[in-house]
Amino acid sequence: MALGWAPRDVEVIDRDLGLSGTSAAHRAGFRELMSRVCLGEVGAVFGLEISRLARSNADLARLAEMARLTGTLLIDSDGVYDLADFNDWLVLGLKSTMSQAELHIMAGRLQAAKRAAAERGELRAPLPVGLVYDDDGATVLDPDAEVRAAVADIFACFAAAGSAYGVVTAFAGRKFPQRAYGGVWAGQLRWAPLTHHRVLQVLKNPAYAGAYVYGRCVTRKKIDADGNVRTVTADLPRAQWPVLIKDHHPGYLTWEEYLAIEARLAANHTGGGGRPVREGTALCQGIIICGGCGAPMAASYHGDDRASYECHSHRDGKKTPGCRSIMAHAVDDAVAVALLDALTPEQVALALAAADEVTGQHQRAGRAAELAVERARYEADRAERAFGQVEPENRLVARTLEARWEARLTALADAEQALQAAQTTLPPLPDRASLAKLAADLPALWHAPSTTARDRKRLLRTLIADVTLLPEADRGKARIGIRWHTGAADQIVIDRPGPTGIPAPTPTPATELIRELGPVTSNTDLVALLHQRGYLTGAGRPFDIKAVQWVRHACQIPSPPPYDSGEISVADAARRLGCSPGVVYYWIENGQLEARRTPGARLCIPWTPATEASCRARIASSGHLNPAARRTRPRQRH
Ligand SMILES: [Zn+2]
């Protein structure tokens, strides 16, 4: 107004107060300003500092470009920018770049301070329920015994049930505590039913294992289909966590237990390729692979608990000639025998002896590493003494001795590292007596009715990595490959169980008749014959074609050949003439060759020497079927 604008021509835009200037997406005020500048309604834009009208360079550049096109002035305490003037445009551009750089540096400094605090394990973050900060700021277990019991029960339930949904089931009707952060209930403890999501949160949170972690998730910017920029949060894999301090505070479980839970959850994650044990009786479910195509086989149940392993590659068009399906019990019995054989007391004694051997080797390796460290330390001390004794004036010698001392120190550090590696990789050995007892009890335990199919499968998976149904030329046999977790592999060949899909009908006079006359009598004649004798089917109905076909199928009774004497099939005719069956079909279709069609749609050709001769003549004269004829035929001229 002091510069001469009328009060009604002055408009104050303050809607964006308190909103971040990094993006124009949420700032209605800035967007309005942009649109009115574009419409040419604005004479000048006043701001305390124009370069900070938007923190994003792109937004400000767009505003400057529009102001240049519409002749709008941008005015702040530093001066008046007429963007049509190159110098003004350049200065504003520079200031805007500096403004963005300032934001970056500021954020960088704040983040660095935060990161440094986190690396010391001192950056405080909200703690999950069951852990609290004490008066000195240290992380401790919640003093509320009820809360502690609820958290501990989640881990206990998971150990028993083996899945997060199992924990939810075990907590049915029981509530789980949740600490509210922010909002009306800030700081208060709320009890709510336990959800699957909550269980996963608890199981995956390393704080419960006493670890301090910073940067478990990252935020990433994404541009959605509408062109809006959205911020999404993603979990980082454990190897990429920027800060992980183990044994930072007391926890509910050890780090090893945490890793075991993580592995179990990953194995349960079917979306990620995991094939967890299921309730069904098929023992190799989830670990059996088709040896033909290499794809996992599916366990299918066909009522009354009979299961089969099936290769479903044909659905993807990847079926190979080696792909087979097999009755589950055949494979399961063989694999169970192999497993129990591997766990006899004698085998376990052998394994323990081998383990003793390995421990001995490790101990010897550890002792050697200790000695190496001692020697390296002695060498380093000696180099240090030699360096200390030399006159400082004798620089050449001192320099050489210093370099030698340094080399000895490096060797010492290497030796110490090797010793530490040797000590930490020492395998923990199970208690011998309890192992031997367990092995002796195992067959009884395995067959006990109280042992569920799930338990058996878990036990199986502790030793066996996978089972493969290998290709086998003999169709009456099945070759099974077992790959143990130790890396050893076994092959077993078993008799493939016969087709048990169709129960054969009990022999009756009717089936005996079909069996006797079936190979030489047609179905129609059989039906007539059965009617004549007054036989009925098992269901008490008179026999029809379908019933006869069923008996043929179930008892594997062949049908009589459809050809009358002197008749041959199309394939036979083609073979005799040395031409393709397509040619014979073509002649029949065009009436050049006589044929009879049976009720089963089969073509029967009455074959006589005369028929054969006429066919041969037809081939000989055809340029298409006989290239020799084509070559000798004179070319037709028009
Ligand atoms: Zn297959």
Image: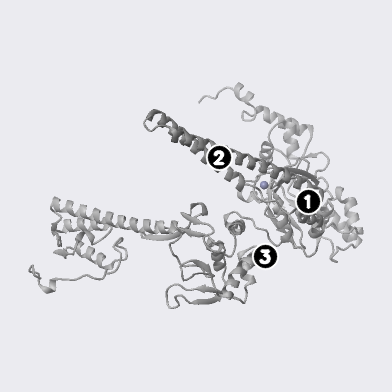
Residue 631 % position (x, y): 60, 22
Q: Amino acid at mark 3?
A: Ala
* Residue 223 in view here: no
Q: Marks 1 and 2: in contact by CB < 8 Å?
A: no
Label annotation for residue 343: 1
Residue 60 % position (x, y): 24, 58
Q: Amino acid at mark 1?
A: Leu
Q: Which residue extends farthest left?
A: 4
Question: What crowding class fits label 2: few (fewer than 14 Cα within 10 Å), some (14-19), or many (20 or more)?
Answer: many
Q: Which residue is mark 3?
A: 160
Badge 2 element? helix
Nearer-the-camera pick, 421 or 147 = 421
Q: Quadrant of residue 55?
A: bottom left
Q: Earlier in the sequence, mark 2 or mark 1?
A: 1
Residue 146 % position (x, y): 58, 75
Badge 3 element? helix
Q: Residue at x 52, y 70 (%)?
A: 129
Q: Earlier in the sequence, mark 2 or mark 3?
A: 3
Q: Is 245 located above or below residue 173 in the figure?
A: above
- Label 2 and label 1: CA atoms lie apart by 40 Å
Q: Quadrant of residue 479?
A: top right
Q: Which residue is mark 2?
A: 415
Question: What crowding class fits label 1: few (fewer than 14 Cα within 10 Å), some (14-19), or many (20 or more)?
Answer: many
Q: Earlier in the sequence, mark 1 or mark 3?
A: 3
**Nearest to viewer (mark 2 / mark 3):** 2
- Label 1 and label 3: CA atoms lie apart by 24 Å
Residue 242 % position (x, y): 46, 54
**Left-right relation of 257 to 28:** right
**Left-right relation of 423 to 481:** left
Q: Marks 3 and 2: in contact by CB < 8 Å?
A: no
**Left-right relation of 384 to 467:** left
